Amino acid sequence: MEFLLAVLAVWRLSHMLAHEDGPWDVIYRIRKRLGDGQLGRMMDYVGCNSIWVSLPAASYLKPMGENFVLIWLSLSAGTLFLEGMYGLLQRKAEGPYGSHRARGISGDKDELEAIWRRYRENLRVPWKR
């Protein structure tokens, strides 16, 4: 049970470092200070973050002894698995058309109504066949 909780904690922190601004924009400011250098680019990737974030978690679970490296890398692997599942769920939630920002939609009312009308026309309703 502790291992599962550690994986969740490592994922949460790694995801926050890579994709969120953090409380009071602390992470945003750190990322801005690091810029486009190697450390700044590493901070944008959950895989890199998970290696370093899982180190203290692994030392909590198994202080430097037998199987420490195995637990350390397993925490990172669990984090990457959760990040993959998170991305999959996010893509499914966006639906077949994806997010409107990625498609360059302006948000104009007429444009959004036209998109909604096309969506309803393509929607298959079982009781109206």
Image (cartoon, rainbow, N blue to C red):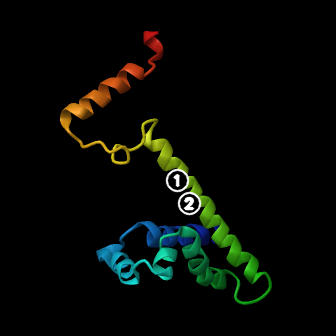
Secondary structure of the residue carrying tag 1 is: helix
User: Which residue: 74% across, 81% down?
Assistant: 69
**Residue marked by disc 2:** 83
User: Which residue: 39% across, 67% down?
Assistant: 20
x and y percentages locating residue 2 in the rendered image: 64, 72
How much space separates mark 2 and mark 1, taking CA atoms? 6 Å
Q: Quadrant of residue 54?
A: bottom right
**Residue marked by disc 1:** 87
User: Does 123 sit left or right of 77 as displayed?
Assistant: left
User: Does 38 sit left or right of 70 as displayed?
Assistant: left
x and y percentages locating residue 116 in the rendered image: 31, 29
Secondary structure of the residue carrying tag 2 is: helix
Amino acid of disc 1: Gly
User: Does 108 sit left or right of 41 as displayed?
Assistant: left
Q: In the image, is residue 99 above or below residue 4? A: above
User: Does 31 sit left or right of 66 as displayed?
Assistant: left
Amino acid of disc 2: Glu
Q: In the image, is residue 38 above or below residue 65? A: above
Residue at the farthest right position: 66
Badge 1: few (under 14), some or many (20 or more) residues near its Cα, within 10 Å? Answer: few
Residue at the farthest left position: 109
Give 54 or 17, whichever is nearer the viewer: 17
Can residue 1 be seen at all in this image of the molecule?
A: no
Residue at the farthest bottom position: 64
Query: Is the Cβ of the residue at disc 2 closer than 8 Å to that at disc 1?
Result: yes
Residue at the farthest top position: 129
* Marker disc for residue 96: none
Q: Quadrant of the N terminus?
A: bottom right
The number of callouts visible is 2
User: Which residue: 25% across, 29% down?
Assistant: 113
User: Which residue: 51% across, 71% down?
Assistant: 14
x and y percentages locating residue 127 in the rendered image: 45, 12
